């Protein structure tokens, strides 16, 4: 598990699971801006998550599903990049 930004359950939470509760991305939004990203068994996306947090947005639920497209690569390939 990797995280970037502010993970606060008081914010709007958007989940994008590849495998429910086992592998996916959890976004934390406030005022349509990404404030935090939790990468749950997703590898090689930390820089992309940080880039999303740095963007002003606006972001909406429909725009975030699948936004980190490489979340489906395997762990061994991605770990060499982080």
Image (spheres, rainbow, N blue to C red):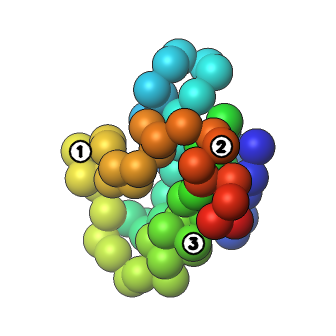
Residue in the picture at 38% in, 65% down: 32
Residue 39 or residue 43, whichever sits in front: 43
First of labels 3, 1 by sequence position: 3
Residue in the picture at 50% in, 19% down: 19
Q: Residues within 10 Å of mark 3 (few under 14, many from 20)?
A: few
Query: Which mark identifies residue 6?
Result: none
Q: Secondary structure at mark 1?
A: helix
For this view, does 21 lie left or right of residue 65? right
First of labels 2, 1 by sequence position: 1
Q: Which of the 4 image quarters holds residue 36?
A: bottom right
Q: Which residue is mark 1?
A: 62
Residue 78 x/y as whole percent: 60, 53
Q: Nearer the viewer, mark 3 or mark 2?
A: 2
Query: Which mark identifies residue 47?
Result: 3
Whether residue 4 appears in this view of the structure is no
Q: Which residue is mark 2?
A: 76
Separation (CA) of disc 3 from disc 1: 22 Å
Query: Most extreme residue toward the top, as rendered?
Result: 20
Separation (CA) of disc 3 from disc 2: 17 Å
Q: Secondary structure at mark 3?
A: helix
């Amino acid at each position: 598990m990797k995280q970037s930004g502010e993970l606060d359950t008081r914010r709007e939470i958007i989940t994008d699971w590849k495998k429910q509760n086992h592998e996916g991305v959890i976004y934390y939004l406030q005022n349509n801006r990404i404030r935090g990203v939790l990468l749950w068994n997703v590898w090689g996306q930390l820089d992309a998550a940080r880039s999303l947090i740095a963007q002003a947005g606006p972001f909406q639920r429909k725009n975030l599903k699948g936004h980190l497209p490489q979340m489906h690569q395997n762990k061994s390939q991605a770990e060499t990049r982080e």
